[in-house]
Image (spheres, grey):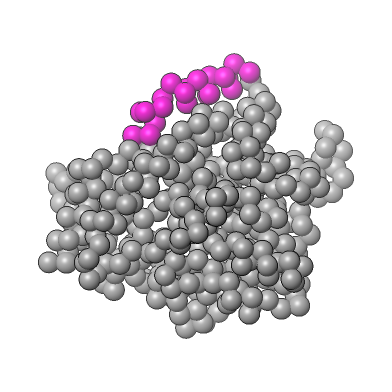
Amino acid sequence: MSVAAKGPASGVERLPLVDLKAQYRAIRPDIEGAIAATLESQYFILGPQVEAFEREFASYIGVRHAVAVNSGTTALWLALWARGIGPGDEVVTPPSTFFATVEAVLLCGAKPVFADVDPATLLLDVKKAESAVTPKTKALLPVHLYGQAADMDGFRKIAQRRGLFLLEDAAQAAGTLYKGRKAGSLGDAAAFSFYPGKNLGACGDAGAVLTNDDALAEKIRRLRNHGSEKKNYHDFLGTNARLEAFQGGILSAKLRRLDDWNAARRRHAESYRRALAGMPEPSCVEEMTEGRSNCHLFVLRHPRRDALLAHLRGQGIEADIHYPVPCHLQPACGIARRPAGSFPVAEKAASEILSLPLFPELSQAQIDRVVSAVRSFQG
Ligand SMILES: Cc1ncc(COP(=O)(O)O)c(C=O)c1O
């Protein structure tokens, strides 16, 4: 799927999808303080700053353990690995997600089995997920896409009935609520990403596994550190997935602002929604009534998406697509690849979706600029 790579006319001010510089300007002393504390301590990997963040984030989500690792991808991978998921096993997951969800399953040697998404929310459809369960299925891996919680009550019931491990891909869902509870506390375990552009973003790669399961948390702590509890003694095979100390300090500083930032994102998303309501095109991805999204992304659908995207980019508005190719069509899927037409809802959505700039510091003038650019495309 190609998108015309037309740049903005010269002199047009650029409006990024996410303005990390604006965030940094607002909290610079705290970030620099966290970095200085790491340098002062000369403790660069895991250590007190990471442990403090683990405690704070676990308490924020409302679970007993947060195990910090070096990316969201690793968090998914280690959670599945720790649960013993491997060759011969299947994991049911949606095709509409960032490829890392699927990659984590493949890295364990297991097979991702796709089920289509709901046409209104683009979240994994509970009934279709249940139909995809076979005797080989070991886990369900719903994704809280765009910051909106998947229907976890539905998945919990299937997991209990079928004895499956329920892992939330909460990479995009820091601060999201589902029936009053935080995403990340709703399954047997959850994986978060703190990629810089996420609502809670590190200054580099970072992630965490959240769980109430003491044994699972302990296993992941050791997997992230070469299968070792005591230096140079290795009880089982692991890897190096440790988080840098800098990131722990930075994430603690940002966690204190997360609720305010998410509230600002929700206000901006509401402004977009109101301003675009009533237009025949585009439509917005719908919000579920049971939850409160953290508004990680604001996603429109338009039948002439590529032309709309080119139009916005021509005006300096850096809209983007999350994600242009559904996972079952990705060559890297190997054994899990499925032919075009297998998941019509996900495939149609992939050709129509477009994310508008959304970040806490977005101004009303910037929102107005985006809205009028969208309206001018309508003619
Ligand atoms: C839904 C989803 N899953 C997994 C990941 C992987 O996280 P990371 O980029 O931190 O490895 C991401 C992040 O991009 C994501 O959006």
Q: Residue furthest left?
A: 379
State the image coordinates of residue 217 (x, y, percent, origin top left).
75, 45
State the image coordinates of residue 343 (x, y, percent, origin top left).
50, 79
State the image coordinates of residue 268 (x, y, percent, origin top left).
31, 47
State the image coordinates of residue 262 (x, y, percent, origin top left).
43, 43
Q: Quadrant of residue 276?
A: bottom left
The answer to whether 211 appears left or right of 206 in the picture is right
The answer to whether 47 appears left or right of 144 in the picture is right
Q: Which residues are magenta?
A: 22-41
In this rendering, the answer to whether 101 lies above or below 38 is below
In this rendering, the answer to whether 115 lies above or below 310 is below
Which is the main secondary structure of the residues drawn in magenta?
Answer: helix
Q: Residue at x 32, y 52 (%)?
A: 270
Tell me if residue 221 is in the magenta stretch: no
Q: Residue at x 33, y 46 (%)?
A: 267
Q: Quadrant of the N terminus?
A: bottom left
Q: Quadrant of residue 232?
A: top right
Q: Is residue 318 visible?
A: no
Q: Residue at x 20, y 43 (%)?
A: 365
Q: Quadrant of residue 140?
A: bottom right
Q: Residue furthest top?
A: 40
Q: Residue at x 67, y 26 (%)?
A: 48
The answer to whether 50 appears left or right of 303 in the picture is right
Q: Quadrant of the C terminus?
A: bottom left
Q: Is residue 62 visible?
A: yes
The answer to whether 32 appears left or right of 377 in the picture is right
Tell me if residue 28 is in the magenta stretch: yes
